Amino acid sequence: MKARLIPFEVAPGSLKPMMELEKTLKNSGLEHSLLELVKTRASQINGCAYCIHMHTKDARANGESEERLYLLSAWRESPLYSDRERAALAWTEALTLVAETHAPDEDYAELSRHFTPVEQVNLTLMIGAINAWNRLAIGFRSIHPVEASRAAA
C-alpha cells in the first residue's frame, strides 16, 4: 500500500483549523478516555487503519485497558462500558452512519440523560472531526506506522 499524498505536507494551512478544533475539544472537559473511545469507534466503522492505530495507541498510553479496546466494536454486548460511554458510543455510531440512521430520537434521548447541552455539542463536534480525519486518511491512503520487520513486502 502506498500513500497518495500527505495532507500535512501539501496543505498545512488548511489543516490548521482542524488542529485547533482538536485542541479545543481536548480541553473541553470531556474525559480523555471517552474521546479516545469515540475516535476509535468511528474509525472502526469507517475502516480507517491509520486512525484506529493512532487512537488505540493513545488510549493505551493514557491507561485504557486492552480488553475494552478489543471489545469496543461489540460494546453493546459487553458490561465493560459505563452508561455515559454507551450513550456516547451510540451517538457516535448514529452520526457516523447518519445517512442510514438519521440520528434517532432514542439515541439523542440517551445522550441527553448523560451529557449537558455543552457536552453534547462538544461530543458532536468531536464525532464530526474524527469522521473528517478518517476521510482524509482513507482518501489519501495514509499509512499507519509499521515496524520494518512486520511490513508486508
Image (tube, grey):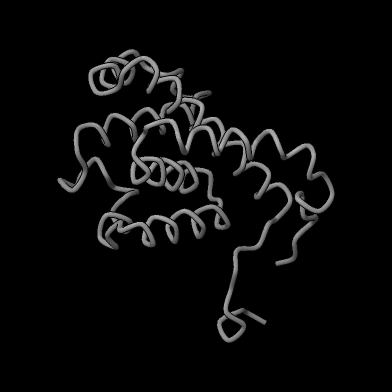
* Left or right side of 133 for 63: left
For the C terminus, which image quadrant? bottom right
Q: Camera-side residue: 17 or 92?
A: 17
Q: What percent of the width, then of the height, locates residue 72?
A: 32, 49
Residue 133: percent from the left, percent from the top?
61, 42
Tell me: residue 26, above or below residue 143. Answer: above
Work out whether 20 lies above or below 147.
above
Which corner quadrant of the image does residue 14 belong to? top right
Q: Quadrant of residue 13?
A: top right
Residue at left 56%, top 38%?
22
Q: Residue 78: x, y in percent? A: 19, 47
- 1 lies left or right of 133: right
Q: From the viewer's side, name the closer residue of 121 and 103.
A: 121
Numbered label tally = 0
**In the current view of this chain or complex, which residue is farthest to the bottom?**
149
| Quarter of image, res 120 | top left
Residue farthest toward the right in the current orientation of the protein: 10
* Vertical relation: 6 (above or below) 87: below
In the picture provided, is 153 more to the left or to the right than 4?
A: left
| Residue lying at 57% horizontally and 79% vertically, measured from the top left | 147
Residue at (53% x, 50% y) in the render: 47
Quadrant (top left, top right, bottom left, bottom right) of the N terminus: bottom right
Between residue 76 and residue 143, name the one nearer to us: 143
- Residue at position x 44%, y 57% in the image: 58
